Amino acid sequence: MFTAAALVSCPPLLIPELAGAATQETADLRSASVEAAARLAESAGTWTIVGVGAAGAHYGPGTVGSFAGFGVDVRVGLGAGPGTPIDPDVPLPVLVGGWLRAAAPGDVVADALVVAADTTPEECVDIGARLRKELDGDATAQSVLVVADGANTLTSKAPGAFDERAPQVQRELDRALDTGDLDHLRRLDPTACDSFGIEGRAAWQVLAGLFGAAPSQVTTTYRGAPFGVAYHVGLWLP
């Protein structure tokens, strides 16, 4: 039975070993993300991590990856035992989800669903609806961790440079994530999102399909853009 969805972001600097001089800048985001993971673990010990990648893929609980590609060999898994070989191609949202899984209390086991960045809005919503049916069909508690970033064009030093239209677009997206506005999420345009560097678009549209109807409760615990990239942390209850 589906119990809750937590929303987090996936900057590599979230990981303390990678943060370096930015440790203090990311402290609030890290604290909120770990707390969201803890609350999700209280809701269910089995997670589905949903993120966006270059291609669609599924990663089971036996998956182990590393942040070595981001500068430090911090190894994370989705529930595998020691000695499991590392998959060098695990995408960033799954790595971050695995790190948060390990930070959560209890013995959380996860699998991960990576949605291709070019998946259409209709397909994303359908993926979410099918996932909800699958989770509700399981007798055990099941929760979802959505790992997605907002616009990366919010300041002149942002990875995507500054787009003067981006702050307003991001404010509208923030409002939707703060209030559980599924219609707004469903209407996100892939081309427009690409232009603003909103890499989490497909994951949020899966979230809209996962809920189908407005969540009963939405709690936002972090919203900010310390590096010109919008990060969001919150919890949605069905």
Image: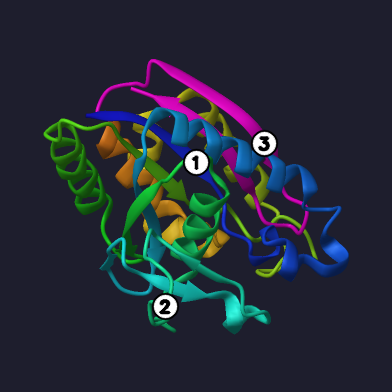
Q: Are marks 1 and 3 in contact (CB under 8 Å)?
A: no
Residue type at numbered disc 2: Gly
Q: Residue at x 38, y 66 (%)?
A: 81
- Label 2 or label 1, whichever lies nearer to me, is 2
Query: Which of marks 3 and 1 precedes in the sequence?
Result: 1
Q: Is residue 188 visible?
A: no
- Answer whether residue 108 is magenta in the image: no
Q: Residue at x 71, y 42 (%)?
A: 31
Q: Quadrant of residue 204?
A: top left
Q: Residue at x 46, y 29 (%)?
A: 42
Q: Position of residue 91 (x, y in %)?
A: 44, 72
Q: What residue is pinned by disc 2?
A: 83
Q: Is residue 221 visible?
A: yes
Q: Which residues are magenta?
A: 212-238
Name above or below for residue 158 compared with residue 203. below
Residue type at numbered disc 1: Leu
Q: Position of residue 156 (x, y in %)?
A: 80, 64
Q: Which mark is residue 222?
A: 3
Classify residue 12 as left or right of residue 158: left
Indicate the secondary structure of the residue bearing disc 3: strand
Q: Residue at x 59, y 82 (%)?
A: 68
Q: Could you classify mark 3 by the number of other residues whose Cα lies within 10 Å: few (under 14), some (14-19), or many (20 or more)?
A: some
Name above or below for residue 135 compared with residue 236. below
Q: Could you classify mark 1 by the number of other residues whose Cα lies within 10 Å: few (under 14), some (14-19), or many (20 or more)?
A: many
Indicate the secondary structure of the residue bearing disc 2: loop
Q: Are marks 2 and 3 in contact (CB under 8 Å)?
A: no
Query: Which of marks 3 and 2 precedes in the sequence?
Result: 2
Query: Which of marks 1 and 2 precedes in the sequence?
Result: 1
Q: Which mark is residue 87?
A: none
Q: What residue is pinned by disc 1?
A: 7
